[in-house]
Image (spheres, helix red, strand yellow):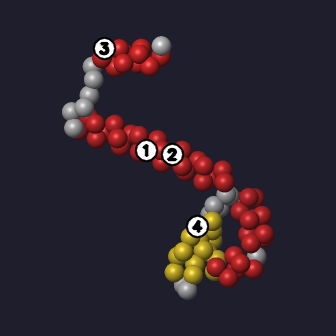
């Protein structure tokens, strides 16, 4: 992953965005020598958001099982039938 100073981003934003759209490799932006932000292309960001949403759903499901909030197949089918009407 490439690292750039925030001043480089200010001065060469168009060039960095062009490169980002071509390579789709995130760029770490630093400010005063410390990581400040990641610059990523839109498609990669959207993919990451979808993946995060899926993982959060799995985590909620695991928590529900852990807490004993489960349904039998028949109960789940009955609830789904109500939604599909």
Name which of mark 2 and mark 3 comes first in the sequence.
2
Name which of mark 4 and mark 2 comes first in the sequence.
4
Residue behind mark 3? 74
Q: Residue furthest left?
A: 68
Cβ atoms under marks 2 and 1 closer than 8 Å: yes
Q: Is residue 79 above or below residue 64?
A: above
Q: Which mark is residue 51?
A: 2
SS assignment at label 1: helix
Callout 4: 10 Å neighbours few (<14), some, many (20+)?
A: some
SS assignment at label 4: strand
Q: Which mark is residue 55?
A: 1
Q: CA distance from mark 1 to mark 4?
A: 21 Å
* Residue 8 visible in the picture: yes
Residue behind mark 4? 38
Mark nearest the camera among 2 and 3 is 3
Q: CA distance from mark 2 to mark 1?
A: 6 Å
Q: Position of residue 34 (x, y in %)?
A: 51, 81
């Amino acid at each position: 992953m490439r690292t750039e100073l925030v001043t480089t981003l200010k001065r060469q934003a168009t060039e960095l965005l062009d490169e980002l759209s071509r390579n789709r490799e995130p760029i770490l932006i630093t400010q005063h020598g410390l990581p400040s932000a990641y610059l990523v292309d839109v498609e990669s960001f959207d993919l990451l958001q979808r993946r995060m949403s899926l993982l959060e759903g799995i985590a909620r499901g695991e928590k529900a099982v852990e807490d004993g909030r489960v349904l039998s197949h028949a109960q789940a089918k009955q609830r789904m039938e109500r939604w599909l009407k």
